[in-house]
Amino acid sequence: MALGAAVDVLTPAEALSPRGLSLVGRADGLMVDHIEGGDAGLVLRALSAAGVTLPAAVLVAPADRVSLDRLRGAGFAAHLVKPVRARSLVRVAAALAAGRPIEADPGEADLGEPPIRAIGRPLDVLLADDNEINALLGRAMLENLGHRVEVVADGRAAVAAVARRRAEGRPFDAFLTDLHMPGMGGAAAIRAIRAAETESGAETGAGPRLLAIVQTADATAASRAEATAAGADATLVKPVDSAALAALFETRLARS
């Protein structure tokens, strides 16, 4: 790098892999791009959950400065507004590496907004994802929204967890599942859950109907149709937008 620093460039998934965690853990500082449709705060929280903490700055577009309060709450010590000026980059990178406090750049105004939170009570959410990194990010996002989370790795475990919680008298409020998983996928799991609800009378008002949301990297109409046919209430394309997920949960709370 022209500034004399050694730089590793990783995607969020790569950063949370064993190799990535090793690289990040040896770094003097971290810069995370707050890209459209993603959430840099979730990446930092996931790294912390994996035992990796270090000084960090976030890169934001001008329109994303309204999210700075939430990003600071996630643990970022500084921000840089894109396109990043060389002077600001050097100032922040040097402070991160030296562990010094980072003074605000007077040319970059801060406009904050409160974090996105669930309205009303926290929801009990079941998350199904066979990818450990995606599950870690998903848990961080749901907990950041203020909800309680249980994680399973496949559809069969999800169906069993839903049945167990219903038998205990404390059913899940929502089920967020990956569409494609080994063994039983998300669509098959939702079909099994809906069949059990019909048998128990949940579909006719005798009990709560589970809010079922499919998340998938496959944005095709066929995938959406598969999820809808299985009984899903909504389909979200990865990376899942936390505001869109929060809106679905708010709808659930309004009906409960």
Image: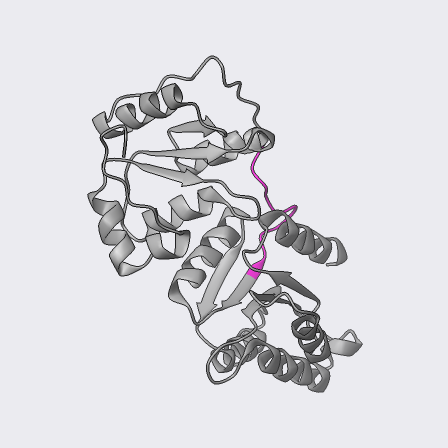
Residue at the limit of the structure toward the front, as seen here: 2
The residue sitting at 29% across, 45% down in the picture is 8
Position of 13 with respect to 230 (left or right) is left
Residue at the limit of the structure toward the top, as seen here: 106
Front residue of this view, candidates 169 and 244: 244
Q: In this rendering, is residue 150 above or below 57?
A: below
Picture coordinates of residue 42, whole percent (x, y):
45, 47
The residue sitting at 44% across, 73% down in the picture is 153
Picture coordinates of residue 235, whole percent (x, y):
66, 65
- Whether residue 208 appears in this view of the structure is no
Q: Quadrant of residue 97?
A: top left
Quarter in which the N terminus is drawn: top left
Picture coordinates of residue 31, whole percent (x, y):
36, 37
Position of 240 with respect to 235 (left or right) is left
Quarter in which the C terminus is drawn: bottom right
Picture coordinates of residue 221, whole percent (x, y):
70, 70
Residue at the limit of the structure toward the right, as seen here: 204
Task: Inspect the magenta stretch and tell me whether residue 121 lies in it.
Answer: yes
Front residue of this view, candidates 208 and 239: 239
Front residue of this view, candidates 136 and 27: 27
Q: Quadrant of residue 78?
A: top left
* Count of numbered circles in the view: 0
Magenta residues span 113-124
The residue sitting at 49% across, 77% down in the picture is 181
- Whether residue 50 appears in this view of the structure is yes
Task: Inspect the magenta stretch and tell me whether residue 115 lies in it.
Answer: yes
Q: Main secondary structure of the magenta part?
A: loop
